[in-house]
Amino acid sequence: MELDTANFACLQWPAVNGDSVRKFGRERLASEMLTHLDHLYRTALFLAKSDADAQDCVQETCARALGAYDQFTGGTNLKAWLTRILYNYFFDSAARHKRMVSTAQLSDEAEEQRDYLDTVASDDPGPDQLFMQRELGAKIRSALGRIPEEFRAPIVLVDMGDCSYQEAAEILRCPIGTVRSRLSRGRKLLQSILGDYLT
Amino acid sequence: MRCEEVQELITASIDDALTPQERAFLDTHLTDCSDCRAQRERESALKRALQQAGAAIRAPENLRAKIIDSLEVGSEGKRTFKPLRTSAWLRRAPSRPVWAVAATLVLLIATLVYRLQPAQDIASLALATHERVLTGKEKLERVADPKELREQLSLAVNQRFRPVALDLSSAKVRPVAGLVKRIGERQVLVTVYEGDGPAITCYTFLGTEADAPKSAELFRDSQMGVNFYIFSDQHVNAVLHKEGDVICILVSQLPPAEIINVLRGMPHHA
């Protein structure tokens, strides 16, 4: 079966630098794609129901990106392009199989499932400073799992993924103003959940 | 203007996403409103916490390995994609023979470049080779023009990546020489900065923050949105950070804090 790349056509954003427009080779795309694995995994983790589903999402994203490598133009934003592919796959898959469930749907499930993000430990124990933040980090991940997807997505992309408003808007296919308003409301929700942990 | 009407402006101000007009508008309101100033502080604290929580989540090594190792040697010695998860990858296996050839190139090179055997290889070897580079035990190409040096180094790796352009004038050094070094299975561009200050070597390569040694100390600059990883041996100090798709390690006898200050463009105090 040929990979349907029609959905990727819209992802050829204007080049950052007009002189640098050039087609990526597959090998270069593969190399640079690996530098975004942390971001893709982090994004998938806050979309999917489980670590296994998040890993599945990332693997499929990589496969689709390589299959559609000629759709990507050098000089444009590879990170955003990959993230959009991940979103497409996640929501397509969720719609088809209902196997993957957005964390937003977890509120009706068992407590241990609702807080699954608490159990996802970073693969790397991380430096001392992050150890000190571990409790707050766990609370944040838990709180993120409890707010609606529409507010969580821009937070994961902008606050945790260093995406610009423009990139988040392209990925989420919504106006920049919507990204801004959802970020604002999402952060308010997180503040109300986290309360004293932030002070 | 009512406080409710500036909440989105506060959010955008924290992300540095305001137009000049909006910023002026918000500043005027904040001057007279302590509640909104407090809200901005709370939201800034939340943003910092979110950044730290995000930085702590990394792709598991087994996932990285699965993707990198998704090669297998076929019966004719050709490399092809190995299904990562049968349902996902076999479904994508196209019938065109050219794909198999392209796939061979893709992951063969990806594997060569990215097989992250001990992730700290380059970091530790950067410390170990710093002195060798400065004492002439490594063959250096000396180029007067920094731009030409950068171009030559880029060409040496077929422009897959470029040395990070650093202005280290605050440390009284400038780029004078470079070399391409293979460390492990990856190519590393080494730029030597010399001048009136202590020499600095800069190692640039395609990688991730996982290339920082496990024992490295993290310093996060929230304003720049950059993580600096500090590590040392007996003689020299190193600071690793990520810029775009490349990892940059600066090695010097300067104290780590001074190296970070140089990277952040702050005055050099040594």
Image: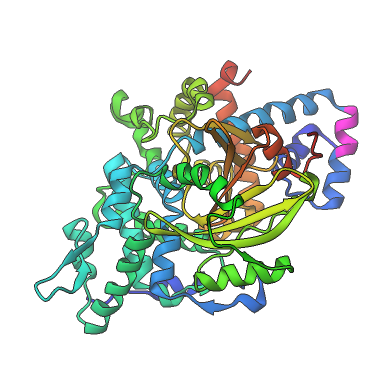
Q: Point out residue B107 in the picture as x, y percentages from the top left corner.
A: 31, 66
Q: Residue at x 33, y 48 (%)?
A: B117
* Residue at the outermost left position: B75
Q: Left or right? Give the position of A19 relative to A63.
A: right
Residue situated in front as seen by the camera: B121 or A27:
B121
Q: Residue at x 62, y 51 (%)?
A: A178
Main secondary structure type of the part rendered in magenta: helix
Q: Is B160 colored magenta in this rendering?
A: no
Residue range of the region highlighted in magenta in the rendering: B27-32
- Figure quadrant of residue A176: bottom right
Q: Residue at x 39, y 34 (%)?
A: A124
Q: Point out residue B25 in the picture as x, y percentages from the top left corner.
A: 87, 43
Q: Point out residue A5 in the picture as x, y percentages from the top left corner.
A: 37, 74
Work out whether A164 lies above or below B39.
below
The C terminus of chain A sits in image quarter = top right
Residue B138 visible somewhere in the drawing: yes
- Figure quadrant of residue B197: top right
Work out whether A164 lies above or below A11.
above
Residue situated in front as seen by the camera: B58 or B26:
B58
Q: Left or right? Give the position of B132 relative to A108.
A: right
Q: Left or right? Give the position of A179 relative to B7.
A: left
Residue A95 visible somewhere in the drawing: no
